[in-house]
Amino acid sequence: MTKYALITGGARGIGASISRELASLGYCVLINYKSSQQRAEELKKEIEENGGSAELLPFDVSNVEEVDNAIERWEDSHPSEYISVLVNNAGIRNDTLMVFMNNEQWDDVISANLNGPFYVTRRLLKRMMTKRWGRIVNMSSLSGLKGLPGQVNYSASKAALIGLTKSLAQEVAPRKVTVNAVAPGFIDSDMTAALPKDELVKMVPAGRFGKPEEVAALVAFLVSDSAAYITGQVISINGGLF
Amino acid sequence: MTKEEIKQSVNEFLIEELEIEPEKLSDDAYLKEDVGIDSLDFVDIVVLVEEKFGFKIKAEDMYNVRTLSQFYDYIEKQVQ
């Protein structure tokens, strides 16, 4: 039976690497995106050329109606299937010092990074529970663990996601659904492209930024059968920067 | 669908899927205290009802449903 894995923000950056990795392991990956349609289509094509299978599932994670409608349509067209793996990867950052942060900057980041995972997870959870198998991985961040100046909105959202992860893990463990968070440090991706890498890399004991593929490999392990007893955890992947 | 069919369908599910002992399933048994249905089991029941009886249980409707026979009655009313 085909296993379906939904990766939110799955067309770009770390999300794209996760889509590729899970597809290579035999999952049919549902690539979610909000605006990166072209990249999503290219990725789908690439996955299919490599013998994998992928579908596109566009919606804005922060818009509850879009989330519910898109997933309902998918379920209607796949009546005997369910999405057993969810990677809540979609996220944005909008950095500025708190004294200059306006409401919109706060709300947008909280909506995408915290409300988004809530809306999507809630929608998929029921099937995972009744089918007695599910994997949820929430993409948190080093910023959610240690805080970073200029990122109170982002740090707050990513720390909150850890609280969600720990509570939900306890709720659904009896139903063989695991919920974990991954907390990457500096990873070469779209999100870090505009950062002063030469300066930041000096802070990283490993002496380099991480690769998206390295994060994808960790996610692949967490969603595997082998990781059935790991739940409610935050796994850092940061080259020793913590 | 008759009340008896509803009862049979619900009980079958409780026994097979939630592994509840058949002797616990008397009409006047309290869902929580006697049958031992917890909030996680309730998620399964919601899905069962959607699939077998074709309607969505509203959480507020369940406030007054405490026993198995009240639950059969509730389903009967909804499917009529």
Image: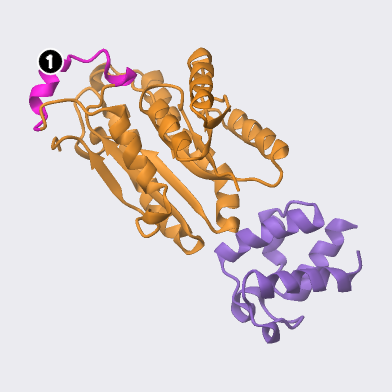
Q: Amino acid at mark 1?
A: Asp
From the viewer's perspective, is A199 left or right of B28? Answer: left
Q: Chain of mark 1?
A: A
Q: Which residues are magenta?
A: A189-205
Crowdedness near tag 1: few (<14), some (14–19) or many (≥20) residues, C-alpha within 10 Å: few
From the viewer's perspective, is A204 left or right of B32? Answer: left
Color of chain B here?
Answer: purple
**A191 in relation to B24, above or below:** above
**Residue sitting at x 42%, y 47%:** A223
Color of chain A here?
Answer: orange
Q: Secondary structure at mark 1?
A: helix
Q: How many numbered marks are there? A: 1
Residue A8 percent location from the top left of the image:
47, 31
**B60 in relation to A45, above or below:** below
Mark 1 lies on residue? A198
Residue A140 quadrant: top left
**Residue sitting at x 72%, y 58%:** B61
Residue B28 quadrant: bottom right
Residue B58 percent location from the top left of the image:
70, 53
**Residue sitting at x 49%, y 21%:** A46
Is residue A192 found inside the magenta-colored segment of the image?
yes
